[in-house]
Structures are given as C-alpha cells and as structure tokens.
Amino acid sequence: MIREDQMLDQLGDALEHSAAADLKPRRRITGRRLAVALAAVAVIVPSAAIAVGELTSTDEVAQSMPAGTLALAGTQPTCTVVQDNVEFHCVLANAPAPEVSDWKGTVEPTVDATKHVNGGCRSLRADGKEWECYLGQAAVTQQIIGPKFLGEYAPSPGVG
C-alpha cells in the first residue's frame, strides 16, 4: 500500500516534470498536451484521496490506539469520523489499564499498521473510555504529540 506522503511525492514529481517541460523555450502547449496533463491530474488526485481514506478508516484508527499505548491493549475501541482523515471520536468497550487514576486530559500517540506514529488521542473522561483522536499534523496542532515524533518508527506500544 502506498503511503500518503509517497503518493504526494509522486504527484509533486509529475507536476514538476510537466511544468519543466512546459517552460522549455519555443514549446507550445497544444490542446492534446493540455488534455493529457488534465487527465493525469484527474486520475492522480482522486487516487490520492482514496488512498488517504483507506489509511484512515475508523477501524484503522481504532487499531492504532492500542498499537501506540500498551495501557489501551484489550480496550476494544470503536471510532466514528468527526472530520474526514483528521479527527475521530473513539469509545472504548473496556477501561484502560489502571496505571492512571484519572485519564481525563491524558494524551497518547497512535501508531499505524506500518509501526509509525500517525497521530494521537486525548482522553475526554476520567475513566478513560472516551477519546478524541487526531491524525497527522492535527495531532501536533492539538499538542498531543511533538512535530519530531510524527512519523517516527514505533515497533511496539509505549509503556508508562
């Protein structure tokens, strides 16, 4: 599966190559060239959106919670979309480990299937059974994770 950043890099490379070709001296953009370029963009952009959607399904967000924090193992999260590919509301079927007496406001990272930090969640209740989760830069903006932690390799859930 192609990661979002890889797909965006490919799109950027294609657009850069196309722009460089268009800026060569004495070259004219023909109707045919323009049609081909527009068709390529029309295929690439929706493909990127679909790939992002696949990477951020509610099930994958739910799985990313215990993958990021051992205290959330066995909690069986279920998540709903608040904002596509950015924010999710998650409820745990089972309370987290009792290592924290009041979970409200606690922040924890989330880890995707490739074992990379992809965002984080904030507990909304003292019992730790309700969370608001953010992916990518939104988790940094929400001050759940630091900018240097986003994308870091995390081979096992965090402890403590």
Image: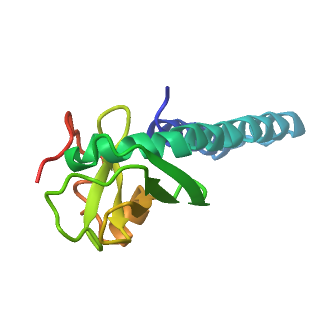
Residue 148 drawn at (x, y percent): 22, 57
Point out the residue furthest to the left here. Answer: 160
Which quarter of the image is occupied by the C terminus? bottom left
- Residue placed furthest toward the right: 31
Residue 84 occupies quadrant? bottom right
- 111 left or right, relative to 158: right
**In the figure, 14 relative to 94: above or below?**
above
Say whether residue 12 is visible: no
With 102 as the anchor, is 92 left or right in this view? right
Q: Residue at x 18, y 57 (%)?
A: 98
From the viewer's side, name the closer residue of 56 and 15: 56
Question: Splitting the image into 4 quarters, where does residue 83 fall?
Answer: bottom right
Task: Name the colour scheme.
Answer: rainbow
Q: Residue at x 21, y 52 (%)?
A: 97
Q: Relative to 64, is 135 above or below? A: below
Measured as percent of width and height from the top left, residue 51 is found at 58, 37
Q: Residue at x 41, y 40 (%)?
A: 63
Residue 42 lies left or right of residue 98; in this view the side is: right
Q: Is residue 94 visible?
A: yes
Above or below for 128 versus 10:
below
User: Which of 126 and 66 lies nearest the eye of the viewer?
Assistant: 126
Residue 25 % position (x, y):
65, 44
Relative depth, front residue between 45 and 85: 85
Q: Residue at x 24, y 45 (%)?
A: 152
Image mark count:
0
Residue 34 position within the rendered picture, expressed as x and y whole percent measured from the top left: 81, 41
Above-or-below relation of 139 to 71: below
